[in-house]
Structures are given as structure tokens and as C-alpha cells.
Image (cartoon, rainbow, N blue to C red):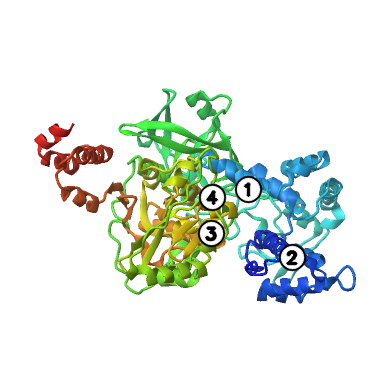
Amino acid sequence: MATSHLPPPPPLEIHDANAAEKWKKFELAWRNYALATELSKKDEKVQVATLLTVIGEEAREVYSTFADWASEGDSKKIEPVLKKFATYCKPQQNVPFERYRFNRRVQEPGESYDQYRTALRKLAEGCSFDTITPEEILRDRLVFGIRDAKVRRQLLRETNLSLKKTDEICRTSESTAEQMKVVEENPETKQVNAVNQPSKREPRAGNERNGFRLQSPQESNNMATKECGNCGKAHDLKRRESCPAFRRTCSKCGKYNHFAAVCRSRAWADRNKNSQTARVVELEQTEEIECDEIYCISDIAAIQLDDSQLVTLKLESGNFLRFQPDTGAQCNVIPVHLYKNATKDLNLKYVKKFQTAIVAYGGSKIPVVGEVKIHVCRGDYQGLLDCKLVDSTEIRPLLGRKACIEMNIIKYIDNDELHKPISGNSPVYTLDSARGEASNHSALSREDLLRKYPKVFKANVGKMDGEYRIRIDTEVDPVQNAPRRVPVALRDKLKMTLDNLQQQDIIAAVTTPTAWINSMVVVPKANGKLRICLDPKDLNRAILREHYPLPTIEDVATRLHGAKVFTKLDVRSGFWHVMLDEKSSFLTTFQTPFGRFRWKRMPFGISSAPEVFQRRMHELIEGLQGVEVVADDFVVVGFGHTHLEAVLDHDKNLMAFLQRCEAQGVVLNTDKFALRQKEVPFIGHIATDEGLRVDPAKVRAITEMPAPTDKAGVQRLLGLAQYRSRTVLSGPAVRIILLFPPVVCQSYL
């Protein structure tokens, strides 16, 4: 007998960013619906018409654009139509690129093993490892290991890259490179006359015409190999843009298009005559090197400090290493030969490969061997120093600006953080370090962010991809609880609340027999509305928990150290973001005066919910910088030596987080959105630029706590004191304990 009263699948969000996953769910729901209603037995035209009725307006518009049907009449057949929709929603995957991402993914700092494993599993979904062949393995190794970055980019752009195509592209690239060498060396290609404007300091030769001199081919050839007077290196002088000093500013005279090392100022030349130390001015990406990071260090004078101005640090090996403080450096630099001797790491066991190059003062490039964190101490300071290792015997170990400030080697007597001028409404221009251009940073306001991300701050409940399956111990017998009485005065509000939850697709009515029936708890809110909660005390005894580790205050405190700007955010109805699969949904069936209902979203009360939700939140912020989450509370922070740097870092982190929430279907609570605060309450503490401190509201709750009168009261007091002892060794919390009558405590211990 057909069950035509079954609700059809919800409309397909065909233009969603995750349309492929949406289609999988819709197709499964559609096939089950067609089978349950016996629609599959009807004429195919009826099936297609029903499909187009329930699939939604957006999908119907897409259907009207379908063409190139395999045969006439396929547009009225259900399987060809479903196949067309599947092809439209399925993204075009580049398997070699997905495998390239998989093999390049390494564990991030602070990332747990489970988080790293989850990220790899997600990346592996698009790699088609289940059908991999020896030819594909060889092709992938060629793509990952090819030395020419341009060729690798060309390979990764191919959608259907085969081993044959890989061979063709690589061989063509090599032969083209060899041919270009021959072409460039061909004398005939150099017989090109160049017209140059003569220098004002040179007399015009006899072959000048109207103020210009016509160069002979021989002179043109000589000019192509002559050392450049602007950068000090030999290169093609015909192409001005090929000079490393082109559009660069001299740090000596302030003029453009030459380096200070070849500046024609006599005083500058005398000053540098005896200086042989190469100074770091910039780390830049080259075409031959794929950089994971790019560090820019401001142009500074090529000077060498005497020994009295150097800083000696003690290493974990017991040896000492002497550094030169460099306030213009953005990173710390150590020559690799000194690192090996000082740390006794002769085989570079602890060095992480780091592909980039350092451009020394004057334009010469120094290869970077890798990066390493070394434990150093000086006086009362102890910490890890992040260093770049260079293959050079001419560079002293350099201590960058950040390390100098952290070790208290240098101090700012005055800056904007100490005495920031009042600018009012006047624009403040600064230099954008990412582009090297002047910019006026105008931070987005709270209202701007609410308008920019309406899907993140909407009034409805969010929904994340994927479903949660509640796993049950089958040895525990199911329990059917009797319905609890609801006061007559609340029945109308309860009915209205249940109807509202049904409309939001959070609960659904149940008319079939279920093994588990839980009790319902109705809690009035301060605004007069009702909160419906599940009381699954019997169900919790059967639930198998995941035991996902929840973050502690100690874990978060270490990662927030040094943050200067804070934003507090809260997930709206957090647990309801997680969908339950159908089998799990019936486990949460509960009794009401108006019949039975089941939760379609993960309800509050089940023992596994906090762990599942915490795992989903950690997966949400995976790879994001400056974002911490505990339960449904998020804090986004900004780091920097100055307040402006911290604000820029914070805004970048916040925009990345909001974009991630929008993509994952997470909705945040507008009422609890606190933007760019100096301090915010977080997990029972106050997060500040000096670290986490105790929330005064919690201290006030302790001071107003009544004296215990029974054993349970004494145990609560001792538990509270034990918890606070981790953050307060003496002071208010200890004195509070001493306020209580000792006789009472002795009588119950």
C-alpha cells in the first residue's frame, strides 16, 4: 500500500558551495521517497514531473538549460534527468592536484594527531587512491619532484593528466629551453641596433644624429655583458626591468633604481670601503624556488658592530653563540657551519627544509638551508629561537627585531603603543607590508561585518555538513518513559514552541513504534519563551561516548599569550548545528502532551554531545590562525608588537574565520558579538594582553557563597578551592576559604 502522506525531500540547494554533497543527500532522499510512495512504478513522465516539483525553483531553472540529451525523449526519463543533475553538481576534480595537496600536507604547530589525521582523510577523498595504478604513481612522483616550478604549474593545470601527457610536457619544456640557449647565443640575433640617449657627461660622437647616437652591433654586444652600475651585477642592460635595482630605493641618497652599495656618493664609498660583512636586506621568492614564507627586511646600512655591542646566548648543548642585534631584520639568521658546531647537530637532524633565498646587501643571493628552533637562554630569559640557516661564511648570526624585543635587548622609549597621538577623523596612512604600498587601514565596524556576512549572523539555526550517528551498547535494554505532566498555563506556549521547532526542521513528529522514549523537560526563559530539553538519563547509560579530549584552560592560556586585540563570538544554538542520522534520530524520541517527537538535530542532554560538538568546532577552525574555541565560545585574537600590527593581524584572522563559518553553515549569535576588545570574558576567566586572569564575577560568587552546613557543601568548597589554586596560589581565593568557620569544616571532613 502506498504511503503517499510521506513528506517529499527538501528542495535542492543547487547553487550551494558544497553542491556535490547536497546532491548526494537529495538523491538518496529522492530514491527512498520514490520507493516508499511507489512512485517508481508510475510512468516516467510522472516521476520527472514530481522530481521537478519537489527539487526547487533554482534546480528547475538549471533543468531548463540542459541540452545534448543522449537520445530524444531522455528529458522525460527519470534516470537520464538524475544523471544530468549529478553531472551538473559534481565538481570537476583534478586528481594529480589533489594528490599533490595530500603529499604536501604536514602537521601544523599545535595541531593534534587526531586533527592532522582528520585533515589527511578529508584530502584523501578526492585522490582516488582506491583505483591508483603504477603509471599514476610514476606520474604523481614526476609532478611532485620536477625541479622546474613553471613546468609543475603547467602539469597541475591539466584536468586529465596522463603519464604520456606528462612526458610530452616535460620533454617539450627541456627541448625548448635548449633551443632558447642556441637562439640567444646566435650572433645574428644580437645584430640589433639600439638607440640610446647620450649621457650629459659624455661628449657626442661623430655618428650622432639630432642628439642621439647610433650604436654599432659590436658596441651593442659589449653592452649586453657589461657590469651594471646600478646593481653591481652583470646582466642584459638592454632590458631595464631585468636589473635587480629597478624601482628600488637607495638607502643612502633616497633616489631610485640603484643600490647603496654602488651609490656614487664618495662619503658612502669611503664608509663601506673596509666593511666586508654582508647584511641581510630581503628574503624574496625567485622563479626557481617555491617559497613557503617570504620575509622582508628593511634596507639597512652594511655596518659591522664591535664585540661590545653583540649578544651572546647560551644553547642547550652548553655552547655559546654570539649574535649581532639587527632591528631591521624580520627573522633570525645563523650560518649553517656555526649552527653545526654550536649545537652539535652535524647531520641537521632537527632542521626543517625551507625553500627560499636571502638577498644580501648589494643584490647577491644566499641559499637558505632550512629553519630550526633552538633553545636559548640569557640571564633570566629562556625560550625557543626560530632561526633561518644560510650557507654562507661571510654573515654573522643575526638576531631579528622580534627576538631583540622579547629578550629585552632593545626597548621602545616612545611609539604609538605608549603614546598614540589623537588623529580624530583625519586619515592615518601606513605602509602595507604585503604590497609595499601606502594604505589607509579602515577597520570594518560591527555593522559592516553584519552586513557583509548575513548568512553567518542570521536569526535561523545553522546546519553543518555531515550527520552524527549515536552508537548504542546493545546489551542495555531500551526504556520507554511515561510522559511528564505539563502545567496547564504552559500548554499553549509548549504547543507553539513545538510547532516552531518543526518549522525549523529541528524536530519531527513520530507516529511509528520506537524502542526508546525519553522524558521532556520544559524550562521557562527570562524572555517568557520556553526551552525544551531532553532528559535522556536512561539513554545516556547506553550511549558509547567518543571520549574526544576537551581543551583545558592551560591549553588555551599558552596560545593566547601576547595577544593584544580580542573578539568574542558565540555559536547560536550550537548543538543544533549537527544533524542526526535517521536511526539516531529515533533514539531521541520524547513524549509530550501532543504526541511523540524526535530530534533531527543533536539535542542538549545526551552524554556524547559535548565531545562531538567540540570535535566539529576544532575541525571548523583547523588551519586558522589566532582563533580558539571551547564548547560554543570562540575568541579571535591579534598579535603584534604595536597595537596597529595587532589590529591588522586580528582583522585578517577574523575575516578568515567568518568566511570559514559562511562556507561551513555555522551561524553566530549577534547579541554576543564583542568586536576588538582589550579584554573579554572567556571560559570563566578574562582574556587580556597580559594573559588570562580570574574573572571578578567568579570571585564575587565565592565571596557571597554561604558557609557550608553539610558534607556536600564542604566538598563543593574544597573542590572550588582546588580548582582556583591552579591560578591563585595566594590572595583572595585563599583568604575566602579562611573566612569560613573552621569548626564547620572539621565536623564534616
Q: For the residue labelled by badge 3, is the local secondary structure a helix, a strand or a loop?
A: loop
Crowding at label 2, few (<14), some or many (≥20) Cα neighbours within 10 Å?
Answer: some
Residue 494, given in percent of the width and then of the height, sits at: 40, 68
What amino acid is found at the position of numbered circle 3 in the picture? Lys
Residue beneath disc 3:
600
Residue beneath disc 2:
38
Name which of mark 3 and mark 1 comes first in the sequence: 1
Q: For the residue labelled by badge 1, is the local secondary structure a helix, a strand or a loop?
A: helix
Quarter of the C terminus within the rendering = top left
Name which of mark 4 and mark 1 comes first in the sequence: 1
Residue 679, given in percent of the width and then of the height, sits at: 31, 56
What amino acid is found at the position of numbered circle 2 in the picture? Glu
Marks 3 and 2: which is nearer the front?
A: 2
Residue 95, given in percent of the width and then of the height, sits at: 74, 50
What amino acid is found at the position of numbered circle 1 in the picture? Lys
Crowding at label 3, few (<14), some or many (≥20) Cα neighbours within 10 Å?
Answer: many
702 to the left or right of 418: left
Marks 1 and 2: which is nearer the front?
A: 2
Q: CA distance from mark 3 to mark 2?
A: 25 Å
Crowding at label 4, few (<14), some or many (≥20) Cα neighbours within 10 Å?
Answer: few
Name which of mark 1 and mark 2 comes first in the sequence: 2
Residue beneath disc 4:
515
Q: CA distance from mark 4 to mark 1?
A: 35 Å
Whether residue 442 appears in this view of the structure is: no
Name which of mark 3 and mark 2 comes first in the sequence: 2
Q: Is residue 733 above or below residue 238?
A: above
Residue beneath disc 1:
122
What amino acid is found at the position of numbered circle 4 in the picture? Ala
Marks 3 and 1: which is nearer the front?
A: 3
Name which of mark 2 and mark 4 comes first in the sequence: 2
675 to the left or right of 714: right
